[in-house]
Image: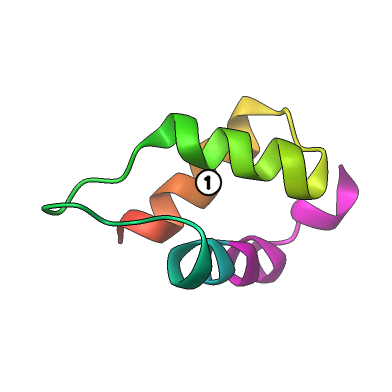
Amino acid sequence: MSILKDDDQIQLIAYWLKTSKVENTEGSVNKEIIRYQLRMEFDVQDDEIVDKVYDAITE
């Protein structure tokens, strides 16, 4: 998906997930939940994109 190739877009998606969809429990975030949300909301299945969004959320 080309919309998420840009780092700014990845940061926006990470912020959206962090603030509305993903719970940070005791400092940990479940990558499978992020993968699921990206697939459901944006039809993203690329592991590289999932990793980038995960890294942005856990920074």
Q: Quadrant of residue 39?
A: top right
User: Extreme right residue here?
Assistant: 2
Residue positioned 42% across, 35% down in the render: 31
Q: How is the image coloured?
A: rainbow
In this rendered view, identify the residue nearer to me: 23 or 14. 23
Q: Quadrant of the C terminus?
A: bottom left
5 horizontally vs 51: left or right? right
Q: Is residue 3 above or below residue 51?
A: below
Residue range of the region highlighted in magenta in the rendering: 1-13
Q: Is residue 1 above or below residue 8?
A: above
Residue positioned 30% across, 45% down in the render: 29
29 horizontally vs 56: left or right? left
Q: Is residue 7 above or below residue 54?
A: below
Q: Is residue 7 magenta?
A: yes
Q: Amino acid at mark 1?
A: Lys
Q: Residue 32 location in percent, x, y?
A: 46, 29
In this rendered view, identify the residue nearer to me: 59 or 43. 43
Q: Which residue is mark 1?
A: 52
Secondary structure at numbered mark 1: helix
Q: Is residue 15 magenta?
A: no
Q: Residue 10 location in percent, x, y?
A: 63, 60
Q: Residue 24 location in percent, x, y?
A: 27, 56
